[in-house]
Image (cartoon, coloured by chain):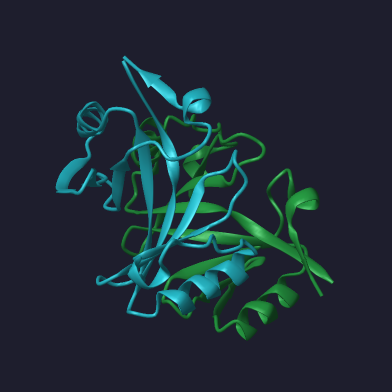
Chain colours: A green, B cyan
Amino acid sequence: MHKSQLAGFIIDCQGDDLDSAATFWSQALGLEKQAADDPAESDYVLLNTRPEEVHIEVQRVDHPSRVHLDIETDDIEAEVARLERLGAKRLSDIRGWVVMEAPTGQRFCVVKPARANFEETANAWS
Amino acid sequence: MHKSQLAGFIIDCQGDDLDSAATFWSQALGLEKQAADDPAESDYVLLNTRPEEVHIEVQRVDHPSRVHLDIETDDIEAEVARLERLGAKRLSDIRGWVVMEAPTGQRFCVVKPARANFEETANAWS
Protein backbone atom coordinates (compact mmCIF):
# COMPACT_ATOMS: atom_id res chain seq x y z
CA MET A 1 0.00 0.00 0.00
CA HIS A 2 1.19 3.50 -0.77
CA LYS A 3 -0.33 6.97 -0.51
CA SER A 4 -0.56 10.03 -2.74
CA GLN A 5 -2.36 13.34 -3.12
CA LEU A 6 -2.27 16.55 -5.10
CA ALA A 7 0.75 18.45 -3.77
CA GLY A 8 0.24 21.77 -5.50
CA PHE A 9 0.74 23.89 -8.57
CA ILE A 10 3.92 25.31 -10.02
CA ILE A 11 3.78 28.50 -12.05
CA ASP A 12 6.59 27.95 -14.58
CA CYS A 13 8.01 31.26 -15.80
CA GLN A 14 10.40 31.39 -18.76
CA GLY A 15 13.34 33.75 -18.37
CA ASP A 16 15.94 34.81 -15.84
CA ASP A 17 14.03 37.27 -13.71
CA LEU A 18 12.60 34.94 -11.08
CA ASP A 19 12.27 37.73 -8.55
CA SER A 20 10.00 39.86 -10.77
CA ALA A 21 7.97 36.79 -11.72
CA ALA A 22 7.49 35.80 -8.08
CA THR A 23 6.62 39.38 -7.11
CA PHE A 24 3.91 39.58 -9.78
CA TRP A 25 2.30 36.29 -8.72
CA SER A 26 2.63 37.11 -5.03
CA GLN A 27 0.77 40.39 -5.52
CA ALA A 28 -1.74 39.00 -8.02
CA LEU A 29 -2.74 36.13 -5.72
CA GLY A 30 -2.26 38.02 -2.44
CA LEU A 31 0.11 35.33 -1.14
CA GLU A 32 3.39 36.31 0.51
CA LYS A 33 6.70 35.12 -0.88
CA GLN A 34 8.45 32.72 1.46
CA ALA A 35 12.03 33.74 2.14
CA ALA A 36 14.48 31.43 0.38
CA ASP A 37 17.82 30.40 1.87
CA ASP A 38 19.66 31.91 -1.04
CA PRO A 39 17.34 33.45 -3.65
CA ALA A 40 20.14 34.00 -6.15
CA GLU A 41 20.91 30.27 -6.19
CA SER A 42 17.34 29.03 -6.31
CA ASP A 43 15.12 28.23 -9.28
CA TYR A 44 11.89 28.67 -7.36
CA VAL A 45 10.06 30.80 -4.82
CA LEU A 46 7.35 29.28 -2.61
CA LEU A 47 4.26 31.43 -1.98
CA ASN A 48 2.78 31.04 1.52
CA THR A 49 -0.53 29.21 1.63
CA ARG A 50 -2.34 27.96 4.73
CA PRO A 51 -1.26 24.54 6.05
CA GLU A 52 -4.39 22.77 4.79
CA GLU A 53 -3.99 24.15 1.27
CA VAL A 54 -2.01 23.06 -1.76
CA HIS A 55 1.47 24.47 -2.33
CA ILE A 56 1.96 27.24 -4.87
CA GLU A 57 5.44 27.84 -6.30
CA VAL A 58 6.87 30.17 -8.91
CA GLN A 59 9.66 28.48 -10.85
CA ARG A 60 12.24 29.75 -13.34
CA VAL A 61 12.26 27.52 -16.46
CA ASP A 62 13.81 27.43 -19.93
CA HIS A 63 10.67 26.19 -21.74
CA PRO A 64 7.67 28.43 -22.52
CA SER A 65 5.75 29.62 -19.46
CA ARG A 66 2.93 27.43 -18.20
CA VAL A 67 1.37 26.01 -15.03
CA HIS A 68 1.87 22.40 -13.97
CA LEU A 69 0.79 20.30 -11.01
CA ASP A 70 2.69 17.95 -8.71
CA ILE A 71 1.40 14.74 -7.13
CA GLU A 72 3.16 13.85 -3.84
CA THR A 73 3.65 10.27 -2.68
CA ASP A 74 5.48 8.15 -0.13
CA ASP A 75 6.44 5.66 -2.89
CA ILE A 76 7.40 7.26 -6.20
CA GLU A 77 7.82 4.00 -8.13
CA ALA A 78 4.45 2.62 -6.97
CA GLU A 79 2.72 5.90 -7.75
CA VAL A 80 4.30 6.15 -11.22
CA ALA A 81 3.13 2.58 -11.92
CA ARG A 82 -0.41 3.46 -10.74
CA LEU A 83 -0.49 6.53 -12.99
CA GLU A 84 0.86 4.49 -15.94
CA ARG A 85 -2.05 2.07 -15.47
CA LEU A 86 -4.39 5.09 -15.70
CA GLY A 87 -2.79 6.03 -19.04
CA ALA A 88 -0.02 8.49 -18.14
CA LYS A 89 3.49 8.19 -19.63
CA ARG A 90 6.78 8.37 -17.75
CA LEU A 91 8.92 10.98 -19.50
CA SER A 92 12.04 11.55 -17.42
CA ASP A 93 13.64 11.05 -14.04
CA ILE A 94 15.12 14.14 -12.39
CA ARG A 95 16.94 14.27 -9.03
CA GLY A 96 14.36 12.63 -6.79
CA TRP A 97 11.21 13.13 -8.86
CA VAL A 98 9.62 11.87 -12.09
CA VAL A 99 8.12 13.90 -14.95
CA MET A 100 5.02 12.33 -16.53
CA GLU A 101 2.54 13.22 -19.29
CA ALA A 102 -1.21 12.81 -18.83
CA PRO A 103 -3.30 11.15 -21.55
CA THR A 104 -4.89 14.61 -21.90
CA GLY A 105 -1.47 16.09 -22.76
CA GLN A 106 -0.38 18.08 -19.70
CA ARG A 107 2.96 17.36 -18.07
CA PHE A 108 3.07 16.89 -14.30
CA CYS A 109 5.55 15.68 -11.68
CA VAL A 110 5.50 12.91 -9.07
CA VAL A 111 7.39 14.13 -6.00
CA LYS A 112 8.10 13.26 -2.37
CA PRO A 113 5.60 14.40 0.29
CA ALA A 114 5.79 18.12 1.03
CA ARG A 115 2.38 19.15 2.40
CA ALA A 116 1.96 19.23 6.19
CA ASN A 117 -1.26 17.19 5.99
CA PHE A 118 0.09 14.33 3.85
CA GLU A 119 -0.34 11.63 6.51
CA GLU A 120 -3.93 12.60 7.34
CA THR A 121 -5.35 13.46 3.93
CA ALA A 122 -3.48 11.51 1.23
CA ASN A 123 -5.34 8.69 -0.54
CA ALA A 124 -4.21 5.12 0.19
CA TRP A 125 -3.86 2.82 -2.85
CA SER A 126 -3.52 -0.95 -2.54
CA MET B 1 -12.39 48.48 -1.41
CA HIS B 2 -12.76 45.12 -3.10
CA LYS B 3 -11.59 41.60 -2.33
CA SER B 4 -9.94 38.78 -4.26
CA GLN B 5 -8.17 35.48 -3.81
CA LEU B 6 -6.93 32.49 -5.76
CA ALA B 7 -10.08 30.56 -6.73
CA GLY B 8 -8.51 27.43 -8.13
CA PHE B 9 -7.00 25.63 -11.07
CA ILE B 10 -8.61 24.49 -14.28
CA ILE B 11 -7.17 21.51 -16.14
CA ASP B 12 -7.90 22.43 -19.77
CA CYS B 13 -8.18 19.32 -21.94
CA GLN B 14 -8.28 19.56 -25.73
CA GLY B 15 -10.80 17.29 -27.44
CA ASP B 16 -14.34 16.07 -27.11
CA ASP B 17 -14.03 13.33 -24.54
CA LEU B 18 -14.55 15.33 -21.35
CA ASP B 19 -15.72 12.27 -19.43
CA SER B 20 -12.49 10.32 -20.04
CA ALA B 21 -10.40 13.39 -19.25
CA ALA B 22 -12.25 13.99 -15.97
CA THR B 23 -12.02 10.30 -15.06
CA PHE B 24 -8.24 10.29 -15.54
CA TRP B 25 -7.71 13.39 -13.40
CA SER B 26 -10.18 12.21 -10.76
CA GLN B 27 -8.29 8.93 -10.36
CA ALA B 28 -4.83 10.49 -10.70
CA LEU B 29 -5.52 13.07 -7.97
CA GLY B 30 -7.81 10.87 -5.87
CA LEU B 31 -10.58 13.49 -5.99
CA GLU B 32 -14.16 12.45 -6.77
CA LYS B 33 -15.99 13.91 -9.73
CA GLN B 34 -18.88 16.09 -8.71
CA ALA B 35 -22.11 15.14 -10.44
CA ALA B 36 -23.08 17.70 -13.06
CA ASP B 37 -26.68 18.67 -13.78
CA ASP B 38 -26.35 17.56 -17.36
CA PRO B 39 -22.88 16.21 -18.19
CA ALA B 40 -23.60 16.03 -21.92
CA GLU B 41 -24.29 19.75 -22.02
CA SER B 42 -21.42 20.89 -19.84
CA ASP B 43 -17.88 21.90 -20.76
CA TYR B 44 -16.45 21.14 -17.34
CA VAL B 45 -16.44 18.70 -14.42
CA LEU B 46 -15.67 19.89 -10.89
CA LEU B 47 -13.51 17.60 -8.75
CA ASN B 48 -14.45 17.57 -5.06
CA THR B 49 -11.93 19.26 -2.77
CA ARG B 50 -12.40 20.12 0.90
CA PRO B 51 -14.19 23.44 1.64
CA GLU B 52 -10.99 25.22 2.70
CA GLU B 53 -9.13 24.21 -0.46
CA VAL B 54 -8.92 25.68 -3.95
CA HIS B 55 -11.31 24.45 -6.63
CA ILE B 56 -10.08 21.98 -9.23
CA GLU B 57 -11.98 21.64 -12.51
CA VAL B 58 -11.46 19.64 -15.68
CA GLN B 59 -12.58 21.62 -18.72
CA ARG B 60 -13.08 20.71 -22.38
CA VAL B 61 -11.30 23.24 -24.63
CA ASP B 62 -10.44 23.73 -28.31
CA HIS B 63 -6.90 25.06 -27.72
CA PRO B 64 -3.95 22.81 -26.76
CA SER B 65 -4.22 21.23 -23.31
CA ARG B 66 -2.81 23.17 -20.39
CA VAL B 67 -3.53 24.21 -16.80
CA HIS B 68 -4.68 27.71 -15.87
CA LEU B 69 -5.68 29.46 -12.68
CA ASP B 70 -8.67 31.63 -11.74
CA ILE B 71 -8.72 34.62 -9.39
CA GLU B 72 -12.12 35.22 -7.76
CA THR B 73 -13.34 38.67 -6.77
CA ASP B 74 -16.41 40.59 -5.65
CA ASP B 75 -15.60 43.39 -8.15
CA ILE B 76 -14.32 42.17 -11.50
CA GLU B 77 -13.59 45.63 -12.97
CA ALA B 78 -11.65 46.77 -9.87
CA GLU B 79 -9.68 43.51 -9.78
CA VAL B 80 -8.83 43.67 -13.50
CA ALA B 81 -7.62 47.27 -12.99
CA ARG B 82 -5.47 46.15 -10.01
CA LEU B 83 -3.94 43.33 -12.07
CA GLU B 84 -3.31 45.68 -15.00
CA ARG B 85 -1.36 47.96 -12.65
CA LEU B 86 0.75 44.90 -11.71
CA GLY B 87 1.53 44.35 -15.40
CA ALA B 88 -1.14 41.92 -16.61
CA LYS B 89 -3.05 42.47 -19.88
CA ARG B 90 -6.82 42.21 -20.39
CA LEU B 91 -7.38 39.87 -23.34
CA SER B 92 -11.10 39.21 -23.62
CA ASP B 93 -14.43 39.40 -21.86
CA ILE B 94 -16.47 36.21 -21.76
CA ARG B 95 -19.95 35.81 -20.23
CA GLY B 96 -19.31 37.10 -16.72
CA TRP B 97 -15.54 36.73 -16.51
CA VAL B 98 -12.36 38.24 -17.99
CA VAL B 99 -9.36 36.48 -19.55
CA MET B 100 -6.00 38.10 -18.76
CA GLU B 101 -2.33 37.40 -19.54
CA ALA B 102 0.37 37.65 -16.88
CA PRO B 103 3.63 39.50 -17.61
CA THR B 104 5.20 36.04 -17.28
CA GLY B 105 3.06 34.77 -20.17
CA GLN B 106 0.41 32.53 -18.62
CA ARG B 107 -3.27 33.20 -19.26
CA PHE B 108 -5.64 33.27 -16.30
CA CYS B 109 -9.24 34.30 -15.60
CA VAL B 110 -10.86 36.78 -13.21
CA VAL B 111 -14.17 35.31 -12.05
CA LYS B 112 -16.97 35.82 -9.51
CA PRO B 113 -16.53 34.34 -6.02
CA ALA B 114 -17.00 30.58 -5.93
CA ARG B 115 -15.07 29.29 -2.89
CA ALA B 116 -17.02 28.81 0.35
CA ASN B 117 -14.40 30.75 2.34
CA PHE B 118 -14.29 33.85 0.11
CA GLU B 119 -15.63 36.24 2.76
CA GLU B 120 -13.24 35.07 5.48
CA THR B 121 -10.02 34.51 3.56
CA ALA B 122 -9.97 36.80 0.50
CA ASN B 123 -7.53 39.72 0.50
CA ALA B 124 -8.98 43.24 0.77
CA TRP B 125 -7.51 45.86 -1.60
CA SER B 126 -8.10 49.55 -1.19
In the image, what residue occupies the spot 41% across and 35% down? A29
Q: Residue pushed farthest front?
A: B37
- Quarter of the image where the N terminus of chain A is located: bottom right
Foreground residue among A119 and A75: A119
Q: In this view, does B22 lie above or below B109?
A: below
- Quarter of the image where the C terminus of chain A is located: bottom right
Res A42 visible: no
Left or right: A17, with B55 as reference point: left
Res B60 visible: yes
What percent of the width, then of the height, locates residue A53? 61, 42
What percent of the width, then of the height, locates residue B98? 22, 44
Foreground residue among A12 and A106: A106
Left or right: B109, with A11 as reference point: left
In the image, what residue occupies the spot 57% across and 55% down? B48
Q: Residue pushed farthest right?
A: A1
What percent of the width, then of the height, locates residue A9? 50, 53
In the image, what residue occupies the spot 41% across and 76% down? A105
Q: In this view, does B78 lie above or below B8?
A: above
Q: Is residue B17 above or below residue A9?
A: below
Foreground residue among A108 and A86: A86
Quadrant in the rendering for residue B87: top left
